[in-house]
Amino acid sequence: EVQLVESGGGLVQPGGSLRLSCAASGFTFSSYDMHWVRQATGKGLEWVSGIGVAGDTYYPGSVKGRFTISRENAKNSLYLQMNSLRAGDTAVYYCAREERRNSGFDYWGQGTLVTVSS
Amino acid sequence: SYELTQPPSVSVSPGQTASITCSGDKLGDKYACWYHQKPGQSPVLIIYQDTKRPSGIPERFSGSNSGNTATLTISGTQAMDEADYYCQAWDSNTVVFGGGTKLTVL
């Protein structure tokens, strides 16, 4: 059974840092592109970052330079290092897998809540 | 930056056909995906590559994409289909989601 389990969320002050993790199981992690998607309360989905099987990384302008996505295939784990956090980064953060570009995000984790507040 | 536009809400009667649109510049030249999300749950992929359904997704869900508009069609809509629906596409090296459409079945 495919499982994606996020962890590492919590309360952080503006300007602070946080590292999210996503533990994958039930599939060959190294063969899939992986993504982080966030959702503020009552709002829509916002893509935050993606990483390909070759380690190539992608970001939207809103987080580029502040967030870093990485993967550790030996540990079946995906990470998101978030720096210079702002109130607008407050959201539930989901990890999701994609078999290849345009194949859709077919499995999602349950999400982890990040709250940026003083 | 690339944008995908969806109507904020769509209403449909049970058993009828619901259509949810997603508009973007030359969207038909890209692949569109669709997700639904029920309150308190994670999104679920229901259509990928414009028209394909993942295993386990009912046949009443179908998709099309041409010109500037992708459309999700739900035939014989059921009460359980009430949810938020999001379209998604890749543009260059970024992923874009539409703003979401709340489908009400009444």
Image (spheres, coloured by chain):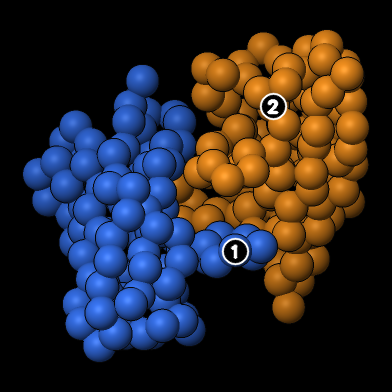
Query: Residue B39 bears which disc, if any?
Result: 1
Chain B pictured colour = blue
Q: Chain of mark 2?
A: A
* Residue at the image position 20 percent from the left and 82 percent from the top: B16
**Marks 1 and 2, how far apart at CA:** 21 Å
A16 with respect to A30 (left or right): right
In the image, A2 versus A6, the foreground residue is A6
A12 with respect to B89 (left or right): right
Residue A102 in the image: state x and y as whole percent.
40, 50
B84 with respect to A91 (left or right): left
**Picture layout, residue B50 above or below residue B6:** below
Residue A10 in the image: state x and y as whole percent.
89, 38
Residue A22 in the image: state x and y as whole percent.
80, 49
Q: Is residue B87 visible?
A: no
Q: Which picture quadrant has residue A79?
A: top right
Query: Residue A89 bears which disc, if any?
Result: 2
Circles 1 and 2, Cβ within 8 Å, touching? The answer is: no
Q: Chain of mark 1?
A: B
In the image, B80 versus A78, the foreground residue is B80
Which chain does orange denote in the image? A
Q: Amino acid at mark 2?
A: Asp
Q: Is residue A34 visible?
A: yes
In the image, A102 versus A12, the foreground residue is A12
* Residue at the image position 43 percent from the left and 72 percent from the top: B82
**Picture layout, residue A10 above or below residue B62:** above
